[in-house]
Amino acid sequence: TGRTRPERLLQYLQKNGTRGDANNVVDTIDRFCGTVEWAMNVGGEKGKIVDKVVLETNPGTVLELGTYCGYSAVRMGRLLAPGSRLITLEMNPAYAKVAKEVIAFAGLDKQVEVLVGSTTELIPQLKKKLDIDTFDMIFLDHWKQSYLPDTKLLEECGLLRKGTVLLADNVICPGTPDYLQYVRSSPKYLSQHFPSVLEYTNAPDGLEKSVYLG
Ligand SMILES: O=C(NC/C=C/[C@H]1O[C@@H](n2cnc(C(F)(F)F)c2)[C@H](O)[C@@H]1O)c1cc([N+](=O)[O-])cc(O)c1O
Ligand SMILES: [Mg+2]
């Protein structure tokens, strides 16, 4: 009966999930998307790669571009060390509202903060607004044509440091050709591709991990 897909996803979670259990929230959303209604969460297969990169990086500060329903914010937030922070940007207020409820349901509302607005508006304000100097990790999963301009904006705003890990979803499907070309050819990045499949399907997709060299 939820009017939108995010609302239906949230209703399914509230009915079938275990409040306060972030692992269960991830599995419950994956079950909804695998059996009831596809949604553009990074999903279980690519999610295992995200988990590995988060655990290896052990970031104190994470910036996510594109919250949607909060699935990847919960997926990454559940692996962060106490005191670490994940900031996630969402420009659609209705999606942000659902995401905040999903994140609270998972018990991660202390570690994860949802900011509503566009990257061009929010990224230049982050240092002041959050008292954060640089991010240890960036997860890109918003509009695919925004990955490249927003990466350049992050560089210009001094939000990246030597070693910051950029992890980008969907570099194969729907694809982010200009971003891929940039991070693979620029001397400022060391990039590695992780082939996988598009969430809840067997279509080819992949993640790109790019370390900023400063
Ligand atoms: O289009 C896809 N994702 C676009 C994702 C878009 C999401 O990012 C938000 N956003 C936009 N700007 C901002 C910021 F940062 F400015 F605040 C946040 C949008 O409101 C939306 O919730 C996609 C599509 C497929 N697919 O199979 O078609 C599969 C996927 O995994 C995908 O991520
Ligand atoms: Mg995606």
Image: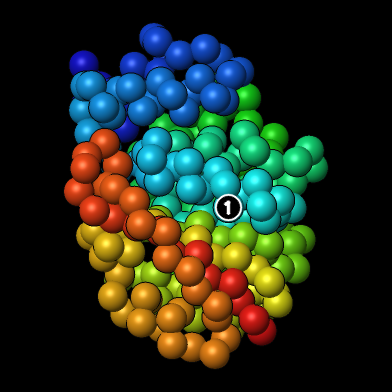
Q: Between residues 16 and 96, which one lies in front from this camera angle? A: 16
Q: Which quarter of the picture shows residue 142?
A: bottom left
For ligand 2, tell me if the residue under mark 1 lies within 8 Å: no
Residue identifier under label 1: 53
Q: Residue at x 67, y 55 (%)?
A: 57
Return the x and y of residue 9 as percentages of the image width and height.
32, 25
Q: Residue at x 61, y 49 (%)?
A: 54
From this view, report whether residue 96 is shown above or below residue 31: below
Relative placement, left or right, of 165 versus 145 is right
Return the x and y of residue 169 as percentages of the image width and height.
39, 57
Return the x and y of residue 111 as percentages of the image width and height.
68, 39
Q: Which class describes the residues within 10 Å of circle 1: few (<14), some (14-19), or many (20+)?
A: some
Q: Amino acid at mark 1?
A: Val
Q: Which quarter of the picture shows residue 110?
A: top right
From this view, report whether residue 166 is shown above or below residue 45: below
From this view, report whether residue 60 is shown above or below residue 180: above
Q: Can the viewer see residue 157 in this picture? A: no
What is the basis of the colouring in this image? Answer: rainbow
Number of marks drawn: 1
Disc 1 element = helix
Q: Between residues 130 and 51, which one lies in front from this camera angle? A: 51
Return the x and y of residue 151 as percentages of the image width and height.
48, 75
- Which quadrant of the rendered structure holds the C terminus? bottom right
Q: Between residues 202 and 22, which one lies in front from this camera angle? A: 202
Q: Residue at x 61, y 18 (%)?
A: 20
From this view, report whether residue 106 is shown above or below residue 55: above
Q: Can the viewer see residue 140 in this picture? A: yes
Relative placement, left or right, of 85 versus 70 is right
Extreme right residue here? Answer: 83
Relative placement, left or right, of 104 versus 90 is right
Q: Residue at x 40, y 46 (%)?
A: 46
Extreme top residue here? Answer: 15
